[in-house]
Image: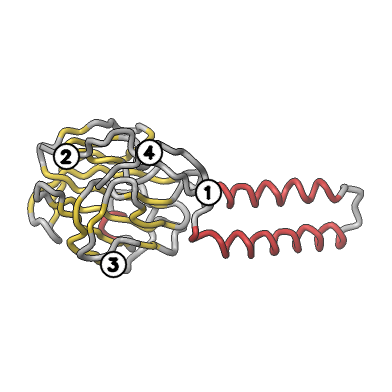
Amino acid sequence: MIRRLKKLKKIRIHREGTNTLIYSFIALAAIAIILWRSFDTKIPFWAFTAVFGTVYLIVLNFYRSPIRYFDSDDTEKIVVAPADGKIVVIEEVEENEYFHDKRLMISIFMSLFNVHANWFPVDGKVKFIRHQNGNYHKAWLPKASEENEHADVMITTPEGTDILCRQIAGAMARRIVTYAKEGEECYIDEHLGFIKLGSRVDIFLPVGTEVCVKMGQKTTGDQTVIAKLK
């Protein structure tokens, strides 16, 4: 892959939010007008506008989609954060669905105020994609990784290492979008998908992988190096 020489950093609105933002604006404007006219109050209209405008800005913030490029052309064996958020899990776990052995799991929790676009964590080729329905436990709980609705994307790196990236729906999330296509090559800097509302992304790596982050650390998707493969 030929890396872009110019490292642009722009903000745009994610395509998943286009309809939501349009309908939300219309709905909030209508509610503000109705409430202002319905109540016998001396509160000026700009006060209603300020309150509902703040709500709309929160929604707008949620659907941000920064254009980011990794800072180095050398991505061999590098694992970058697939999402903005906070590291909530770094531990060895038994992964019995695909690998049937121990894996190092690193989990990133995304709050309502984080960008919810997801990036590919490594360069490679998409081996397969699996979507599983499930519960909607709070995303930071350990059982959320297996019991919540989730989408699994298995990526094989150029060196032949299989990496599992799992998008997990949280207590409020009701839609997981995955852009990855089975059999296609994928690269750091490209969007893997999007999760609506609070949620989480798990990365399953080989045991012995060098961890480059710590518990509670904040991550920036496609920018923060979370691990280095051996």
Counting from the top left corner in percent of width and height, residue 40 is at 91, 57
Q: Residue at x 22, y 39 (%)?
A: 75
Between discs 3 and 1, the one toward the N terminus: 1
Describe the element under mark 1 as helix, strand or loop.
loop
Between discs 3 and 4, the one toward the N terminus: 4
Contact between marks 2 and 1 (CB within 8 A): the answer is no
Between discs 4 and 1, the one toward the N terminus: 1
Q: Amino acid at mark 3?
A: His
Counting from the top left corner in percent of width and height, residue 227 is at 21, 36
Q: Residue at x 36, y 47 (%)?
A: 140
Q: Which residue is the site of mark 3?
A: 131
Query: How far, Cα to Cα, is label 4 from label 1?
Result: 22 Å
Q: Amino acid at mark 1?
A: Arg
Q: Which residue is the site of mark 2?
A: 77
Contact between marks 3 and 4 (CB within 8 A): the answer is no
Between discs 3 and 2, the one toward the N terminus: 2
Name the mark nearer the viewer: 3 or 2: 2
Q: Amino acid at mark 4?
A: Lys
